[in-house]
Amino acid sequence: MLKIPFFSKKDLFSDQEKKRIVDAIREAEQQTSGEIRIYVESRCRFVDPLDRAAEVFAFMKMDQTSNRNAVLIYVAVKSRQLAIFGDQGIHEKVGEEFWKKEVIHILSQFQKDHHADAIVKVILDIGAVLNHHFPFDRPTDVNELPDDIVFGR
């Protein structure tokens, strides 16, 4: 089992790293109609972080994108849990193994204190598969969700 070093949600990313993450989201979304969001909180209220990610996904209305192709990267810092939740449209295309591989990558990099690097890499990986299955169409695509990092409680 991999251990995530202890950080509070506020100091997980520096201001420069937050900017890199938001820039990565914007870069990824310029290639796809898909949407990517990051949600960071202190503790996960559920045993399985995927259940909490699904709850946050619905709360943030990510299930209302036109192609059902939004993806949430969920991190609970003090609980040392994370999950990636993809909506029906993208999940049907990439399957469970893709998400598991990306979570394993994040965990391996978190263990080395490379938090922002891990998140940026996974954003770009997700952006690439979103581009493959849901390419950007300039006349019709709009940014349906904000690109900022959401910090919960």
Image (cartoon, rainbow, N blue to C red):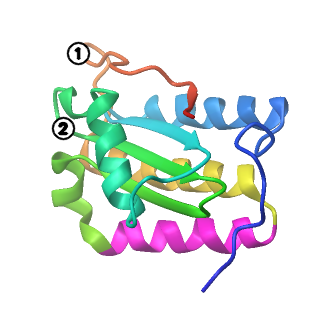
The quarter of the picture where the C terminus appears is top right
Residue found 16% across the figure and 49% down from its top:
88
**Crowdedness near tag 1: few (<14), some (14–19) or many (≥20) residues, C-alpha within 10 Å:** few
Res 98 quadrant in image: bottom left
Residue found 23% across the figure and 46% down from its top:
87
Q: Farthest residue to the front: give it.
A: 45
Residue 127 visible in the current orientation: no
Residue found 51% across the figure and 60% down from its top:
82
Which residue lies under the disc numbered 2? Answer: 68
Rendered position, 24 above or below 5: above
Q: Which badge, 1 or 2, is on the more N-terminal residue?
A: 2
Q: In this rendering, would 16 be left or right of 133?
A: right
Q: Amino acid at mark 2?
A: Arg
At mark 1, the secondary structure is loop
The quarter of the picture where the N terminus appears is bottom right
Residue 56 visible in the current orientation: yes
Which residue lies under the disc numbered 1? Answer: 140
Q: In this rendering, would 147 be left or right of 5?
A: left
- Between 87 and 126, the residue placed more toward the observer is 87
Q: Amino acid at mark 1?
A: Thr
- Asked if residue 31 lies in the magenta stretch, the reply is no
Residue 58 location (% of width, % of height): 26, 35
Residue 123 location (% of width, % of height): 53, 48
Res 115 quadrant in image: bottom right
Range of magenta residues: 97-112
Residue 35 location (% of width, % of height): 37, 33
User: Cβ–Cβ below 8 Å for labels 1 and 2?
Assistant: no
Q: In this rendering, would 128 be left or right of 140?
A: right
Residue 18 location (% of width, % of height): 72, 33
- Between 113 and 121, the residue placed more toward the observer is 113
Q: CA distance from mark 1 to mark 2?
A: 15 Å
Res 141 quadrant in image: top left
